[in-house]
Image: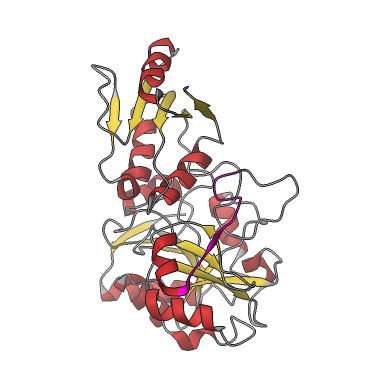
Amino acid sequence: MFTEVCRADDAAIARAAQLIREGALVAFPTETVYGLGADALNAAAIPAIFEAKGRPSDNPLISHIADWDALEGLISETPNETACRVMQAFWPGPLTLIFLKGKNVPDAVTAGLDTVAVRFPSHPVAQKLIRAAGTPIAAPSANRSGRPSPTTAQHVAEDMDGRIPMILDGGACGVGLESTVLDVTGERPRILRPGGITKEMLEEVIGEVDVDEGVLGMLREGAQVRSPGMKYRHYAPMGEITIVTGENASRHIAQLYDEAKGTAAILAFSDADYGTRRVYRLTDASGELFSVLRRFDEDGIAQIYAEDVPLGGMGLAVMNRLMRAAAFRVIRAE
């Protein structure tokens, strides 16, 4: 299959919308990461997403909308007060809400769950595409399953060239991490995946918010995946990542680096001095994380030793992605 990479002008968006209506896949930009989209209401179109990504079918998808009226049919009941307050505060934007599933949603979109994940993205290309297609668009991140998520069209092409017919190039994504996923179906709102809308931001609007134990920990064996991004290993480069925590983390990282067999690198979020060792230092941990994880592969890095990040604000989202990229390989340096 030939994959066309197109600047996201009106003509390209119209062609992309036609592909969506015909049951094909299109990669498109959002403010978080690039998505790999299909018609969310077309049961025959959804399996192609899982095939192109190599994604397990027990991992639910997010349905993207471009106006609130599109919730009709996607969800089974009127949004509750909590949902309405966060929708008014953060939609359109990098927030996905978990609702009870409506009758129009194919089981393949929700991985058989009785809930559905819905997001109203703020990116103008995403909004234009959804409106032009005339249907909600189901879209995970547009990368091969387990790989770092794509924040540019070039990243998408690295993983999806020859697998999908079209990539809409809308430039680099602004947030750089996937959306926050908030479950509003229970008695208390619960973050299933942290992202661009932080816990602190949510609590300013709706009061106390729980954080699911799966955000920074492994799912229990046999546990149901209730949100994208909850699988064991995800967002990972080919090299092995080890996270080092504790007061002596930088000293221990330097020691591990010196003892490494093969090409090693340090992923630093602080200004710790690592001398002449190879350091990838992030000043914007959320916006640059996935790009740097891909650079490790480009540079042939086999061993990556990463500092941890304080959990306040976007730190929770960064550590969620980093823990999964490391397959929860953590060393505490006392």
Q: Residue at x 44, y 60 (%)?
A: 199
Is the magenta region chiefly helix, strand or loop? loop
Judged left or right of residue 196, residue 78 is right
Q: Residue furthest right?
A: 222
What's the residue at 40%, 70% (across, down)? 204
Is 262 in front, or is 306?
306
On the question of residue 24 being in view, the answer is: no
Q: Percent position (x, y) of residue 75?
A: 60, 81
Q: Quadrant of residue 218?
A: top right
Instruction: Residue at 40%, 30% (x, y): give it.
Output: 306
Q: Magenta span covers which residues? A: 206-217
x and y, in percent, of residue 105 in the image: 63, 77
**Is residue 120 positioned above or below 190 on the image?**
below
- 118 and 155: which one is in front? 118
Q: Quadrant of residue 258?
A: top left
Q: Considering depth in this image, is 196 or 55 the residue closer to the camera?
A: 196
Is residue 326 toward the left or the right of residue 249 in the image?
A: right
**78 vs 146, nearest the viewer:** 78
Q: How is the image coloured?
A: secondary structure
Is 281 contained in the magenta span? Answer: no
Residue 201 percent coordinates (x, y): 39, 65
State the count of labels: 0
Q: Is residue 207 magenta?
A: yes
Does residue 270 appear left or right of residue 114 in this picture?
A: left
